[in-house]
Image (tube, helix red, strand yellow):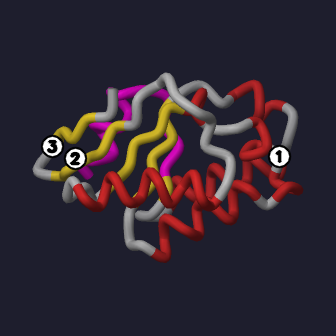
Amino acid sequence: MNALRTIHDVPLFFCAAEGEPIGSERDALDVIGEASYQGARWAVVPAERLDETFFRLSTRVAGDIVQKFANYRLGLVVVGDISPHTADSSALRDFVRECNRGRQTWFVADADELDERLKG
């Protein structure tokens, strides 16, 4: 079930692990709309909710979704193990590394890593 939680004074919208895959700008807008309505500053999406095309950068799905979140000034956190995807793609590894340097999109392994990122 989707839920709004505040961690370190930051309102976060947590997407449920179960549900339709997020694989298009329209899907991203659904998440953005619900998160914004609830007053979140970040949307936290389990990696398993992302469509497989998200992890193939040649499809442009990841770029389109990340850009949609940026346009609406809502942060995106992908939580979970994406190592099978990054092991197969140096471009995806670079994308994740660059995202994690910024303040718009983060890829974190688990809730503890998210907590650490929000502290700093």
Q: What is the three-letter code of the residue carrying label 3?
A: Thr
Give the camera-side residue of 60 and 23. Answer: 23
Specify the label residue 6 is tagged with.
3
Magenta span includes 30: no
Reading the image, the residue beneath label 1 is 56
Q: Secondary structure at mark 3?
A: strand
Give the camera-side residue of 23 and 87. Answer: 23
Residue at 26% of width from left, 52% of height from top? 120
Across and down, in percent, residue 50 comes to 63, 38
Q: CA distance from mark 1 to mark 2?
A: 31 Å
Left of 112 or right of it: where is 23?
right
Q: CA distance from mark 3 to mark 1?
A: 32 Å
Q: Nearer the viewer, mark 1 or mark 2?
A: 1
Q: Are marks 1 and 2 in contact (CB under 8 Å)?
A: no
Q: What is the three-letter code of the residue carrying label 1?
A: Arg
Q: Secondary structure at mark 2?
A: helix
115 vs 40: above or below: above
Reading the image, the residue beneath label 2 is 119
